[in-house]
Image: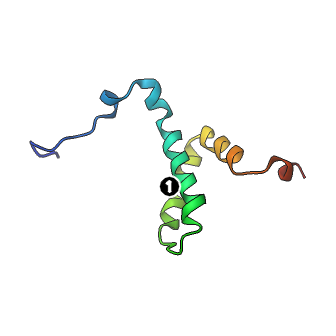
Amino acid sequence: MFEKNEAKLVMNELYPPEKLYKMPLEVFKFVAQYYLTITQRNSNKGHIPQLNRIMKSYLNCSNECCMWLLTQFSSWPLLRE
């Protein structure tokens, strides 16, 4: 699979377990912020379907991601109405 001289990235050797546990949430935060702030305003909308699939997969797998998205990109006074 890997060439002799090819380096491979082993996450569990680079980061402690508590940081690895939070990694999916951090990746989701980056993708969501990029999607909602840059991609939606960009004239090149070709990446939207791929980013939608990525975001949906994270939301389906993680309640943390769902709660973060709701708290960051919604207005609670509007939701109460």
Residue 15 appearing in the image = yes
Q: Is residue 52 left or right of residue 17?
A: right
- Relative to 80, say whether 45 is above or below: below
Dot 1: within a 10 Å radius of its alpha carbon, few (fewer than 14), some, or many (20 or more) residues? some
Residue 16, position as x, y percentages in the image: 39, 24
Viewer-side residue, 28 vs 38:
38
Residue 33, position as x, y percentages in the image: 57, 53
Name, please, the residue furthest toward the left.
4
Viewer-side residue, 59 vs 8:
8
The residue positioned 11% from the left and 46% from the top of the image is 3
Name, please, the residue furthest toward the bottom.
43
The residue positioned 78% from the left and 50% from the top of the image is 75
Residue 42, position as x, y percentages in the image: 54, 70
The residue positioned 59% from the left and 68% from the top of the image is 41
Where does label 1 land, which residue? 54
Q: Secondary structure at mark 1?
A: helix
Viewer-side residue, 37 vs 15:
37
- Relative to 50, say whether 78 is above or below: above
